[in-house]
């Protein structure tokens, strides 16, 4: 079954989940030929292991606190803070507390 994504012109709610945070899962909000936007939901101590993607990325913490490790360096993000990563940079995410973040990935380049 295909994952439903938002279509062009469709409103997407990215406000904090608040009390619903513990029941929500990570989901792709939309994906086009050149761009993907994901709402990352992690419970305290959950992690997303170190990896690389070809395109540039932004990680915008919506609620809670996450730690984004970029090539071995810790970058704690609190609600309202955003981190930009160049394509191909190794990064991983650990939730310091229950958190959600908006992750935007540019899909135009391929990793070698």
Image (spheres, rainbow, N blue to C red):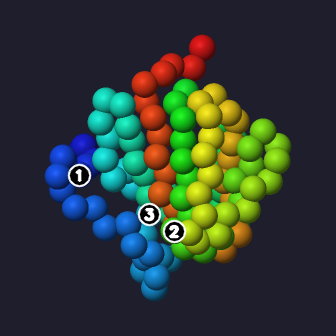
Task: Name which residue lies at 43% across and 76% down.
Answer: 17
Mark 1, Cα crowd under 10 Å, few <14 / some 14-19 / many 20+, is: few
Q: Which mark is residue 62?
A: 2
How far across and down, in percent of the image, does residue 48 sit?
Answer: 63, 51
Nearer to me, 79 or 111: 79
Who comes first in sequence, dot 2 or dot 3?
3
Say whether residue 11 is left or right of residue 36: left
Q: Is residue 4 visible?
A: no
Dividing the image into 4 quarters, which one contains the N terminus?
A: top left
Marks 2/1: CA distance?
A: 19 Å
Mark 2, Cα crowd under 10 Å, few <14 / some 14-19 / many 20+, is: many
Q: Which mark is residue 6?
A: 1
Q: Which mark is residue 28?
A: none
How far across and down, in percent of the image, does residue 30 sit?
Answer: 31, 47
How far across and down, in percent of the image, does residue 12 sit?
Answer: 28, 62
Q: Which residue is mark 3?
A: 25
Task: Name which residue lies at 44% across and 63% down.
Answer: 25
How far across and down, in percent of the image, does residue 47 sit?
Answer: 66, 56
Marks 2/3: CA distance?
A: 14 Å
Q: Which is more foreground, mark 2 or mark 1? A: 2
């Amino acid at each position: 079954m295909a994952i439903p994504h938002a279509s062009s012109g469709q409103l997407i709610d990215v406000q904090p989940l608040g009390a619903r945070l513990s029941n929500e899962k990570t989901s792709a909000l939309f994906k086009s030929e050149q761009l993907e936007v994901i709402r990352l939901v992690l419970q305290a101590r959950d992690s997303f292991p170190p990896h690389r993607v070809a395109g540039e990325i932004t990680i915008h913490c919506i609620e809670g606190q996450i730690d984004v490790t970029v090539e071995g360096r810790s970058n704690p993000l609190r609600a309202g803070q955003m981190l930009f990563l160049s394509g191909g940079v190794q990064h991983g995410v650990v939730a310091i507390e229950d958190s959600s973040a908006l992750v935007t990935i540019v899909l135009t380049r391929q990793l070698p």
